[in-house]
């Protein structure tokens, strides 16, 4: 039997860590989890919160849209704004 597909729905904190790199250990873990997932499903509330965080004057990302675009481009798999749906393997 092959391995089961890894599907994740990261919350805002995982996305922020992966994009900003603001914490050496946690940012590396977040990037690895996103990179190793077969499917990364992004919930609309998490994306809205991500933009809000990146738009903060304290954010290391100057432009929220640029930060979001950069972060999403780092995700190797398909993206979705809906929930992960069960699939048969």
Image (cartoon, rainbow, N blue to C red):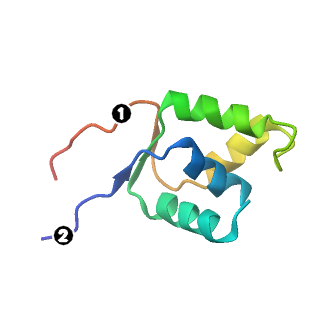
Q: Could you tell me which secondary element the residue under label 1 belongs to?
A: loop
Using residue 9 as the reference point, say whether residue 29 is left or right of it. Answer: right
Q: Which mark is residue 54?
A: none
Q: Observer-nearest residue: 77 or 71?
A: 71
Where's residue 82, x and y in %?
A: 40, 30
26 to 9, vertically: above or below: below
Q: Which residue is mark 2?
A: 2
Please tell me which of labels 1 and 2 falls first in the chain.
2
Task: Estimate the x, y position of residue 28 in percent, counting from the top left.
Answer: 61, 68
Which tag is nearer the camera, tag 1 or tag 2? 1
Query: Residue at left 22%, top 68%?
Result: 3
- Where the N terminus falls, by quadrant? bottom left
Q: Secondary structure at mark 2?
A: loop
Instruction: Give the camera-side residue of 51 and 78.
Output: 51
Q: Residue at x 54, y 35 (%)?
A: 46
Residue to which mark 1 is pinned:
83
State yes or no: discs 1 and 2 in contact (Cβ < 8 Å): no
Q: Look at 52% across and 56% down and name the residue there.
A: 76
- Residue at point 71%, 31% (across, down): 52
Residue 12 lies, with reference to residue 3, above or below; the image says: above
Give me the C-alpha separation between circle 1 and circle 2: 24 Å
Q: Quadrant of residue 74?
A: bottom right
- Work out which residue is located at the far left of the displayed protein and give it: 1
Q: How many C-alpha atoms fall within 10 Å of the one at disc 2: few (<14), some, or many (≥20)?
A: few
Q: How many marks?
A: 2
82, above or below 5, in the image: above
Q: Position of residue 10 (x, y in %)?
A: 48, 47
Image coordinates for residue 5, horizontal then vertical, percent: 28, 58
Query: What is the crowding at mark 1: few (fewer than 14 residues within 10 Å), some, or many (at least 20)?
Result: few
């Amino acid at each position: 039997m092959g391995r089961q597909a890894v599907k994740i729905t990261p919350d805002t904190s995982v996305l922020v860590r992966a994009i900003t790199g603001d914490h050496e250990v946690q940012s590396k873990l977040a990037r690895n989890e996103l990179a190793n997932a077969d499917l990364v499903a992004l919930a609309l509330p998490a994306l809205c919160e991500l933009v809000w965080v990146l738009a903060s004057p304290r954010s290391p990302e100057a432009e929220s849209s640029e930060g979001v675009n950069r972060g999403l481009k780092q995700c190797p798999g398909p993206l979705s704004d809906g929930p992960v749906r069960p699939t048969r393997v």
